[in-house]
Amino acid sequence: MTLVLALLAGALIGLSLGALGGGGSILAVPVLVYLLDQSPAQATTGSLVVVGVTSLVAAVTAHRAGRALVARGVVFGLVATGGAVAGAKAAAHVDEDVLLAAFAALMLLVGGLMATRQLRHRRGTGPAEPDAPAPQLDDPIITFRPTFACACPRALKVLVTATVVGALTGFLGVGGGFLVVPALLLALALPMDKAAGTSLVVITITSATALAVRAGSGPAPDWTAVLALTGASAATAVLGARLAGRIGTRRLQTGFTVLVLLVALYTATRAVLALT
């Protein structure tokens, strides 16, 4: 029964990543810890496999559908690798209970932000999602020919956000899609559908970087459990990526927000009890 629940959770992770460009990865650690009996250190490493493979599969599907700007995603991902390396190295020196508590705090923050955004959209008081004019999609941030030019405020936004995303990926084993999508919306002026697809490219790169740094250090996860979760997640990521082009994502976002908050409260309770 536990494995069945884990596979169902893996399917939800893949659906969220494929359809929304993020979010589902934040469930991978709790699933590995509480359903598959992995330690926090094992889970934060194993989740990088789940998130990385799932994002890669979804990114390919999104690219074929014309919803992923691969070049932009690769650049953002490469900038984020510095933070991913630093985060992965820092995680090796942190107590496991503290690591899980930090993850619980992140989940509560993300869940709260998602809930606030949903409420604002329903009331009509939140800012409208930016739909950038088509020409801006091709506007470079830095050019060297015919003369050097730099949109430095945008470059700084990309640098800071990418580094934070990379650090979270390396330290907590999450993809950081909940930060990547807003960053691509604002810093690179991408429309929502392109931001969701492009974020999958970024998550693939940062997850692979963090996993490479963690390899050989710390306890190895139970690869059978990790691969089972990865398989379920990757399979539904294709479905999620296809659905994103056909239906609105607001209902998916609402349901996922509720789920994240419930898992966050459970994880936070367990983490606090472990620390006391």
Image: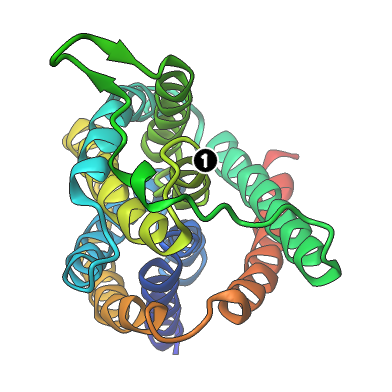
Q: Position of residue 227 (x, y in %)?
A: 21, 69
* On screen, residue 128 above or below 155: below
* On screen, residue 189 above or below 20: above
Q: Is residue 269 visible?
A: no
- The residue lying at 78 percent from left, 56 percent from top is 126
Residue 146: quadrant of the picture = top left
Binning the other alpha carbons within 10 Å of mark 1 as few (below 14), some (14 to 19) or many (20 upward) gives some
Quarter occupied by the N terminus: bottom left
Residue 89: quadrant of the picture = top left
Quarter occupied by the C terminus: top right
* On screen, residue 42 above or below 67: above
Of residues 57 and 95, the one drawn nearer to the viewer in this rendering: 57
Q: Is residue 245 visible?
A: yes
Residue 101: quadrant of the picture = top right
Of residues 108 and 97, the one drawn nearer to the viewer in this rendering: 108
Of residues 58 and 45, the one drawn nearer to the viewer in this rendering: 58
The type of residue carrying mark 1 is Leu
Q: Position of residue 76 (x, y in %)?
A: 30, 35
- The residue lying at 31 percent from left, 82 percent from top is 242
Tell me the SS state at disc 1: helix
- The residue lying at 57 percent from left, 44 percent from top is 103
- The residue tagged 1 is 186
- The residue lying at 40 percent from left, 43 percent from top is 41
Q: Position of residue 144 (x, y in %)?
A: 16, 14
Left or right of residue 129: residue 157: left
* On screen, residue 103 above or below 214: below
Left or right of residue 213: residue 190: right
Left or right of residue 132: residue 98: right
